[in-house]
Amino acid sequence: MELWINEANTASQRVAQKLGFAIKGRIPQKYAYEEAHHFMLVYGLLAAEWREEPEGQPHRSGLFSVEPVLMVEDVSETAEYYRDRLGFQIDFLFGEPANHAAVSRGDWTGSTVTIQLTRLPEGRRLEPAGYLYIVTDTRLDALCQDYRAHGVEIVSDPQDQPWGMREFTIRDLNGHLLVFATHI
């Protein structure tokens, strides 16, 4: 069972905790009449836990995040681009010269975007396919303006989409597309 509780509703959170529910996730949401987004906290409890049954069948492993790995021509140069132009931090550079790295942007556990970078194998041609879809807070237009000011290639300006998101797209120095989106 899941309970979706607004982050401001501390009384309901306390009731959920007393009943044995634990936080399983956070969903960013934005109401049309509000300027900023908020989080819907997802509390969960399995039926066997509620009945306090001994564990029989093993539970499926939980998935917590995904870290896409982009193939790039030059790992160090790409990590510096993500740091200097896109506001990410360099988490690590591995190898001399660097052949693998990770960059991230975010302040809190559970709301950080991490992208790994790996050197394109010798003799292989870089052919970006698909795109990364990165959900942001409500300051999407300001983010696009900041990227434009830092010389980032803007492929499409912010626009409202019929699926309830406002999005813009950039192309990084290796040709990878990143779509930044927020709930409208």
Image (cartoon, rainbow, N blue to C red):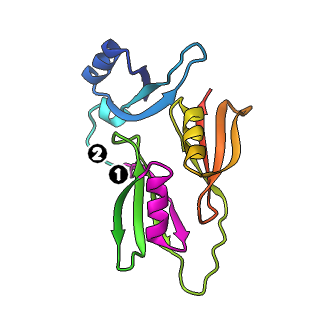
Q: Residue at x 59, y 40 (%)?
A: 144
Whether 140 is drawn above or below 4: the answer is: below
Left-right relation of 53 to 174 = left
Q: Is residue 57 magenta?
A: no
The span picked out in magenta is 59-88
- Tell me the tag on residue 77: none
Where residue 114 appears, as percent x and y from the top left, is 43, 53
Give the quarter of the figure containing the N terminus: top left
Whether 25 is drawn above or below 71: the answer is: above
Where residue 90 appears, as percent x and y from the top left, is 37, 58
Q: Residue at x 53, y 18 (%)?
A: 35
Residue 97: quadrant of the picture? bottom left
SS label for mark 1? loop
Disc 2: which residue: 55
Q: Which residue lies furthest to the bottom in this view?
A: 123
Disc 1: which residue: 58
Instruction: Using a 10 Å C-alpha cutoff, classify the residue at mark 2 as few (fewer than 14 neighbours), some (14 to 19) or many (20 or more).
Output: few
- Depth check: give the residue in front, 162 or 105: 105
SS label for mark 2? loop
The CA span between labels 2 and 1 is 7 Å
Circle 2/circle 1 CB separation < 8 Å: yes
- Note whether residue 63 is visible: no
Q: What residue type is labelled 1?
A: Pro
Whether 138 is drawn above or below 76: the answer is: above
Where residue 179 appears, as percent x and y from the top left, is 62, 47
Question: What is the total number of numbered labels drawn onto the structure image?
Answer: 2
